[in-house]
Image (cartoon, rainbow, N blue to C red):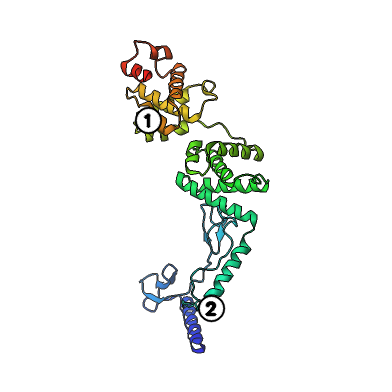
C-alpha cells in the first residue's frame, strides 16, 4: 500500500509538472489539456505529451434547460415531484457485493437485507406511502396516455397539495390521482377527454369527475373551458380523415360563436365538426366510426353538426337544407340512418 501510494503521488506530481511546463519538447509550442480524453497535447504540432491526466476542473453538471449556472448540481438526477421525497434520498444497493465487487457471505447478505428493510421503513410514513402510491399511478396513467413528463409532474404536485389540505382523508387515492392528471392536462393546454383518462384508470368515470371537481374547488383553480379545436386533430387522425377535413373542421369551430355551443361537450362539438367537414368535402365519415373514437352518441352528432352548419358561414347549408328532399343523396341517407 505504501509503495502504491508513493507511486500515485509521484505520477500526480509528474502530471502537474507537465501541465505547468506549457512548452512542447519538439516545437516549443503551447501545451493545452484535452479534458475530454485526459491528454496533454501540443497546440502547434499535435504531439501528445501525457495521457490519463487528472481533470482539475469543477464537477458541476446541469440537468435542465435553464441557463447555465442556475441549475448546477454536483451529483444525481434532478429534483422531481414524481417521487415522494423529490428524488433527494439515498438507498442501499440490492447488489450483494462489497466495494471491491466480491460476493458477500451469507451472514453479511442477511445483515444487509435487514438494513434495507429498516432503511425502507425509515423513508416512509403513512402519508408518504400514499404519495408514493399516487405518484406511481400518475406515472402509469401518464405513460399509457402518452402525456409529457411536465404534465405528470404537475399532477404529482397537485396531489401533494390535496394531501396537505387533507382532501384525501376518507377518499380513494385512485380517484384523486386520476382527477389530478385530468386537471394537469388542462392546465398545460393539452386536454384529454375524461373518458380517455377513465380508460387507463382503475376507477369509474363519475368518480374521477367528482374528484377533479373537488380538487379544482378546494385548490381554487380557475380553468378556462376546453376549446373543442384541441380535440379535432386527434379525432380526425383516429378516423383516417384527410388534412383538408381537419383544416375545415377547425375553421368551422373558429368561426362559430361560443354562445351557440355553450354547454355542449367539447369532444362532441369537435367530433361533429369533423363530420360536418366531411360533408363539405363530399367525403362523409360514418357516424358510428366517429362515435367510437369520440365517446359520443349518434344523436348528439346529428344535432350538433346541424347546429354548426346553421350558425357558420363556411357553407350555404342549414338544418332545413340538410333535411329537405333537395339535399344531396349521400347526406340525406346518412341523416336517415
Q: Which residue is at the front of the view, 169 or 56?
A: 169
Earlier residue among tags 1 and 2: 2
Quarter-of-image position of residue 336: top left
User: Does residue 247 appear in this view?
Assistant: yes
Residue 153 against residue 312 in the figure, above or below:
below
Secondary element under disc 2, as helix, strand or loop, is: helix
Looking at the image, the residue that sits furthest to the top is: 325
Quarter-of-image position of residue 318: top left
In the picture of the structure, the residue carrying the numbered disc 1 is 289
State how many labels appear.
2
At x 57%, y 54%, the residue is 132
Residue 282, how many percent across, how many down?
A: 32, 22
Q: Which mark is residue 236?
A: none
Residue 133, how many percent across, how many down?
A: 56, 52
How dense is the environment of label 1, judged by Cα within 10 Å: few (below 14), some, or many (20 and up)? few
At x 44%, y 27%, the residue is 297
Secondary element under disc 1, as helix, strand or loop, is: helix
Residue 312 against residue 66 in the figure, above or below:
above
At x 55%, y 25%, the residue is 263
Q: Which residue is at the front of the view, 57 or 94?
A: 94
Looking at the image, the residue that sits furthest to the right is: 165
At x 51%, y 52%, the residue is 65
Residue 134 against residue 269 in the figure, above or below:
below
In the picture of the structure, the residue carrying the numbered disc 2 is 107
Amino acid at each position: 500500500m505504501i509503495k502504491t501510494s508513493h507511486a500515485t503521488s509521484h505520477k500526480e506530481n509528474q502530471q502537474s509538472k507537465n501541465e505547468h511546463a506549457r512548452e512542447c519538447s519538439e516545437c516549443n509550442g503551447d501545451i493545452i489539456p484535452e479534458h475530454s480524453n485526459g491528454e496533454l497535447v501540443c497546440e502547434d504540432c499535435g504531439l501528445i505529451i501525457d495521457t490519463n491526466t487528472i481533470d482539475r476542473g469543477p464537477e458541476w453538471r446541469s440537468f435542465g434547460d435553464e441557463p447555465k449556472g442556475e441549475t448546477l448540481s454536483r451529483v444525481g438526477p434532478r429534483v422531481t415531484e414524481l417521487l415522494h421525497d423529490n428524488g433527494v434520498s439515498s438507498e442501499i444497493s440490492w447488489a450483494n457485493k462489497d466495494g471491491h465487487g466480491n460476493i458477500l457471505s451469507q451472514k453479511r447478505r442477511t445483515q444487509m437485507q435487514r438494513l434495507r428493510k429498516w432503511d425502507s421503513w425509515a423513508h416512509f410514513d403513512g402519508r408518504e406511502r400514499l404519495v408514493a402510491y399516487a405518484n406511481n399511478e400518475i406515472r402509469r396513467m401518464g405513460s399509457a396516455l402518452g402525456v409529457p413528463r411536465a404534465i405528470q409532474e404537475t399532477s404529482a404536485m397537485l396531489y401533494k397539495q390535496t394531501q396537505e389540505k387533507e382532501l384525501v382523508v376518507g377518499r380513494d387515492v385512485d380517484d384523486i390521482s386520476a382527477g389530478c392528471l385530468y386537471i394537469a392536462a388542462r392546465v398545460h393546454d393539452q386536454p384529454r377527454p375524461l373518458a380517455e383518462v377513465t380508460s387507463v384508470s382503475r376507477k369509474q368515470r363519475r368518480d374521477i369527475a367528482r374528484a377533479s371537481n373537488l380538487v379544482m374547488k378546494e385548490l381554487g383553480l380557475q380553468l378556462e373551458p376546453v376549446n373543442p379545436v384541441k380535440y379535432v386533430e386527434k379525432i380526425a387522425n383516429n378516423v383516417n380523415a384527410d388534412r383538408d377535413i381537419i383544416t375545415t373542421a377547425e375553421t368551422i369551430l373558429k368561426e362559430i360563436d361560443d354562445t351557440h355551443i355553450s354547454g355542449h361537450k367539447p369532444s362532441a362539438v369537435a367530433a361533429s365538426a369533423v363530420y360536418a367537414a366531411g360533408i363539405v368535402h363530399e367525403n362523409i365519415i360514418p357516424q358510428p366510426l366517429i362515435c367510437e373514437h369520440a365517446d359520443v352518441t349518434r344523436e348528439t352528432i346529428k344535432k350538433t353538426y346541424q347546429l354548426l352548419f346553421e350558425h357558420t358561414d363556411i357553407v350555404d347549408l342549414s338544418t332545413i337544407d340538410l333535411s329537405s328532399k333537395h339535399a344531396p343523396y349521400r347526406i340525406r341517407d346518412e341523416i336517415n340512418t
